[in-house]
Amino acid sequence: MELLYQYAWLIPVLPLLGATLVGIGLISLNKLTNDLRQINAIFIISLVGTAMVMSFGLFWSQFQGHEVYTTTLEWASAGDFHLQMGYTIDHISSLMLVIVTTVAFLVMIYTDGYMAHDPGYVRFYAYLSIFSSSMLGLVISPNLVQIYIFWELVGMCSYLLVGFWFDRQAAADACQKAFVTNRVGDFGLLLGMLGLYWATGSFDFGVMGERLQELVASGALWSGLAALFAVLVFLGPVAKSAQFPLHVWLPDAMEGPTPISALIHAATMVAAGVFLIARMYPVFEPIPVAMNTIAWTGATTAFLGATIALTQNDIKKGLAYSTMSQLGYMVMAMGLGSYSAGLFHLMTHAYFKAMLFLCSGSVIHGMEAVVGHDPILAQDMRLMGGLRKYMPVTAITFLIGNLAICGIFPFAGFWSKDEILGQAFTANSSLWLIGWLTAGLTAFYMFRMYFMTFEGEFRGNDTGIRQRLLTEAGMSFAPGAMDAKEAEHHGHSDSPHESPVTMTLPLVMLAIPSVAIGFVGMPWNNYFEEFIHAPGEVIEAGHFELNEFLIMAGLSMAIAFGGIIVALLMYRLRKIDPVAIAKKYPALYQLSLNKWYFDDIYYKVFIVGCRRLARQIMEVDYRVVDGAVNLTGLATLLSGEGLKYFETGRAQFYALIVFGAVLGFVLVFVVV
C-alpha cells in the first residue's frame, strides 16, 4: 500500500500524459491522429481509468485509517522564503480523487457516442483529459500556491471547452465571459493569498489558520484586516462556484458540448470552489465575519438560482441554474460550520447532476434527429414532450436524478440536503427558511423540466412552434423552401430515438450512486461524517434524536412534494395555466425570465461604462499626451530651423551676437 502512496503523483500525471501525446499528434500528424480517433479515445479513457483505480485504492486505505501522506520538495527559495511543491493524500483529497475520476471516466465513455460525428472528436478528448488532470492536481495540492497554479489551469481548460465550437459566436462569447468573470474572483484570491502570507509567513493551510488566530488574539493584527484577507480569498470560490454576484458565466457555459457541461457542473470547476473553502477552513472558521459572508452568499445564490430556473425553457440552462442553486446550499453549509454536510452534498450532487446533464445531452442527441443540429430547437423544452416512450432509459435515469435533487426519500439528495437544512435550523432560522423555500422551488422547476420533456405529446414536428422559437431568436424557418442540404441540417426523422449504449451505459452507472450513496450519511449511522470532518474537530458519537429528524425530514419532504404537485397540475394535468399566471404577474415573470436583469445591469455598468471610460482616456491620450509630444516636436523643429541661420562659421557674426547679448544683459540690469 505504501507503494501506491509513493506513486500517487501519477493520478494527475496520467491524464496529462494522454493529453500531451494526443496533442502532439494533432499538431504534428493531424490527419493520421484524427483518422485513429477511437484508438486515441481508448488510450485517454484507459489512462483516466487507471487513475480511477489508483484513487479507489487510496480512498480505501484512508477509510481503513491510514495516516495522512505528504511528500514535498523545495521548489524555490530566497532568503527566508521557501516554497514547497508536492502532494498530500488525506481524507478529503482521497474522496475528491474518487469523485473526479469516476465522473470523468463515465463522461469520457459517454463522449464517444455524443461526439461521434464531430470533426473535433480527438481534440475534445485531449481537452477533457487535461481538464481532469488539472482538477486532480488541485485536490492533492499541499499548499495554497500550488492550488492557485492548478486553479488557473482549470480556468484555462474551461475556456477551451466552453468555446470548443469557437466558430459559433455564442460559444466564443460564452468562453470569454467565463474567463473574464473568473479573473475577477481570481484577482481577489491572489490578493488574499499575498495578504495572508504577509501576515503569517506561510502558504500552508493549517499554519495560516493558527498564526492568523494568534496574531488577532494578541492584537498584533487588526481583526478587520484578517477578515478582509479571508473575504478576498473567498472571492475565488465565488467566481469558480458561480456564487452571487459572479454567477453570470455559468448558464452561458452551456454553449460547450454537453459532456463538458456535465464535467464542469458535477466534479471539476464548480466543485473546486467548494473544495477550496474546505481547505481554507482553518482560516475562515475563527473569523465570524468571513463565515457569515460565506453563509449568506450561499443562501442568496441558492434562492436566486432557483427563482431564475422557474421559467427557463432551454433544458441545459435550466440545469445550469439548478447547479448554481445547489452550490449555494454547499457554500451556505460551509459558512454555517457544517463542514461535513457541505462536502456530503458536494459528493451526492456530483453524481446525480452529472447524470442529469448527460441525460439532457441524450435528449438533445435524440431531438437532433428531428429538428437538426440547431441548438435553439434541439434544446428548447417547448419542442419536446412525450420522449419517455422514445427514450425510456434516458427518461428513467432523468427521473431518478430528479428525485435525488428534490430530496425525496431514500434518494441521495434527501440525506445530504436534509442534513444541511437541519444544521441551518439549529444555527440560523432565517437561513433555514431560505433553504427550505428553495427546496420547494427546486422540486417545482425540476419536475416542470421532466413533464415538459418526457410526458404528454411530442411537439417536435410542430412547425408553428419551430417558427415561433426561431422568430424569438431572430431567425427564420421555411420548410417548404429548404434545399436538400438544409433539409439534412433540419433533421431526417419524424421521432427521436434512444441514444447508443456508450451514452446510456454511463447514465445507468451514475443512477446507482444517485440512489444509494446517500446511505453512507444517515444521521444515526453517519460514516461520511466520521470520515470527513473539519480539521481539528473531534467527532463523538452523539445521541440521535428521532423526533427531530422526523420533523425536519417531514418539512423538507412536504415542501418538495408541494413543488412536485404544483408542477404536475401545471404541466401534466393542465389544471393550472402557467401562461395565465405569467400574465397576472408580468413583472415577476420577466424578472425570472431575464435572470433578474444581472446580465443587462453588468452590460450597462461594466461593458458600456468601460467603453465610455476607454473613449475618454483615448481622447485625453490623443489631445493631451499626443498633443504634448507633438508640440515638443514642433518646438524642436522650429527652433532648429531658426537657429541654423545663426551657424554661419564667420567669426565677425559670432562677435556681433556676443556683443548684442552683452548689450541686452546691460539694458536688463539697468532697467531692473
Image (cartoon, rainbow, N blue to C red):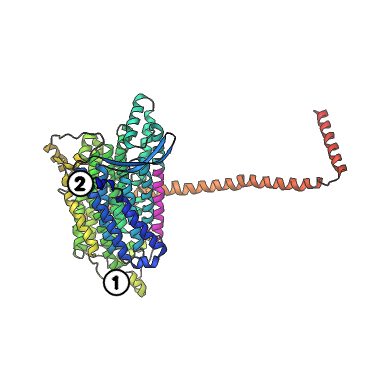
Q: Residues within 10 Å of mark 2 (few under 14, many from 20)?
A: some
Could you say whether the residue bearing mark 2 is in a helix, strand or loop?
helix
The stretch in magenta equals: 164-186
**155 and 71: which is toward the camera:** 71
Q: Can residue 168 be seen by looking at this rendering?
A: yes
Q: Nearer the viewer, residue 87 or 660?
A: 87
Left/right placement of residue 554 relative to residue 246 reads left
Q: Classify residue 384 by image quadrant.
A: bottom left
Q: Is residue 590 visible?
A: no
Find the residue positioned furthest to the front: 3
Task: Please report whichever mark, 2 or 1, sits nearer to the chain's N-terminal start.
Answer: 2
The residue tagged 1 is 492
- Identified by mark 1, the residue type is His
Q: Secondary structure at mark 1?
A: loop
Tell me: residue 659, above or below residue 597: above
* Label 2 to label 1: alpha-carbon separation: 49 Å
Q: Which residue is situated farthest in the top direction here?
A: 218
**Quadrant the C terminus occupies:** top right
Q: Position of residue 159 (x, y in %)?
A: 38, 53
